[in-house]
Amino acid sequence: MAFEGLTSKLQQTFKKLKNKGKLTEKDVKDAMREVKLAMLEADVNYKVVKDFVNSVSERAVGQEVMESLTPAQHVIKIVNEELINLMGKNESKLNISPVPPTVIMFVGLQGAGKTTMAGKLALYLKKHSKKPMLVAADVYRPAAIKQLQVLGSQIDVPVFSLGDKINPVDIAKAGIENAKKSGCDYVIIDTAGRLHIDEELMNELINIKNSVTPNEILLVIDAMTGQDAVNVAEQFNNSLDITGAILTKLDGDTRGGAAISVKAVTGKPIKFVGIGEKLTDIEVFYPDRMASRILGMGDILSLIEKAQEAIDEKKAMDLQSKLMHQQFTLEDFLEQMQQMKKMGPMKDLLKMIPGIDSSKLGDIDIDEKELAHTEAIIKSMTKQERQNPSIINSSRKRRIAAGSGTSIQEVNKLLTGFEQSKKMMKQFADMQKNMKKGKIKF
Ligand code: GDP
């Protein structure tokens, strides 16, 4: 995930400040120098860094901070607030057309992740009870139309195409007409990109803009391109007056500077981010949550949302009832694990929890491996064994270990762990019962 380097450097700086107790003006200045270097290394635009550090310094060397009992906390609070300001204060919602359909035009360089993001946004809208339509207006990249059609069929969203022999302006117009007729309330137009910005590309995009007057012109930017991402944003904005940006590939090894700079440089908000290659890897961009992540303070709200999306509410209720009535089997255990897996890699989830030092998460993948082993062991059991583990004798254990590519010790460990958690659950259920009867008071 992005920002790893920046987060750990900022945490080191703040730790030094915390160790100091009272702060002098020089302490704050030194810290700000370190913040400045850390941000520059993370590819934040130079001018943005300069302005940022100036505003933080101005506020941080004031009387109130210096004389407070927890000056370091005060400085961190100011950095957090200024970071949020820089990235746009609040989330920026999509501009909706008063008369449907809302037209969203995607622009950006080739390879930025435009087509993928068109699919992701369509799925996102669908999940929010909207009826999106994708329009294939990239007639230059040979596979672009097919790629969009494949994405569309995966998420069951209609894709409008007139092939690659028709002018993109006409395709866009016809696509919108088609959406109106078929009752679609959102149209996402996937336009062509180039490897570099050129006049021909811009002219074509301007022509589309002028003929369909979109509600949104969203620039899709590859966060991995570092400083260049901001230059691209500036140029597209100058020509097209974009309404917002979408940053892709924030899951990669990017240093994340673009996320911090785009709003400050273009004045246009980031609306969504792409965090992986899967169609569900899209998040609304919340400046405050992003600031929290950058500062290593966690992002509990996003974590809860991920859980809500991944966990089926009915299943959760069933599970609770099974726990209460002690009918929880290894099959339920497996299902619960699979739901957890849907929330993404454990390492990324842990990073959203406040107080977890991301630099120390190096060996967490072992847990992921353990999780995979547990899954393999349970899958190697028969239905009967999963429902009634007490029948698992030594020869069954041998078969399960061989089938799952694990050892008998691992099978034993899982069974003991399962029995223990069942016991704990029973105690918990008893406690709840007693509480209801008023036997336990707090
Ligand atoms: P386009 O030329 O702008 O339409 O780009 P594509 O949508 O074809 O994406 C280019 C490549 O980037 C593909 O291999 C995508 O799978 C990949 N990609 C897109 N978005 C993301 C993302 O958020 N994370 C990662 N890791 N890869 C992405």
Image (spheres, rainbow, N blue to C red):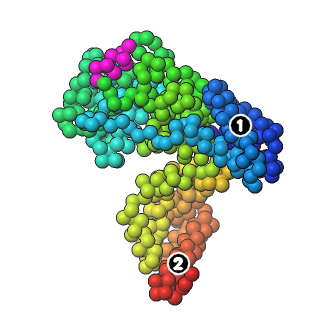
| Majority secondary structure of magenta residues | helix
Q: Residue at x 20, y 33 (%)?
A: 180
Amino acid beneath label 1: Ser
Give me the C-alpha separation between circle 2 and circle 1: 51 Å
Q: In the shown orientation, is residue 317 left or right of residue 374?
A: left
- Depth check, front residue: 437 or 360: 437
* Horizontal relation, residue 259 to residue 164: left or right: right
For the point 71% across and 33% down, the residue is 36
Tell me where the magenta segment starts and ends, as one range.
Answer: 203-212
Q: Residue furthest left?
A: 181
- Number of marks in picture: 2
Q: Give the secondary structure at mark 2.
A: helix
Q: Quadrant of residue 415?
A: bottom right
Which residue is nearer to you in this view: 410 or 349? 349
Q: 396 or 47, which is in the foreground?
A: 47
Q: Is residue 401 above or below residue 234?
A: below
Q: Residue at x 55, y 84 (%)?
A: 441
At label 1, counting other C-alpha atoms closer than 10 Å, the crowd grade (few under 14, some 14-19, many 20 or more) is many
The N terminus: image quadrant: top right
Q: Look at label 2 and name its amino acid.
A: Phe
Q: Is residue 7 above or below residue 144?
A: below
Q: Which residue is mark 1?
A: 57
Residue picked out by circle 2: 428
Q: Is mark 1 within 8 Å of ligand 1?
A: no
Q: Reply above or below: 326 against 53.
A: below
Q: Looking at the image, can residue 34 be seen?
A: no
**Point 62% across, 44% down: residue:** 80
For label 2, count other residues whose C-alpha is less than 10 Å away and answer few (under 14), some (14-19) or many (20+).
some
Image coords of residue 347 (percent x, y): 59, 50
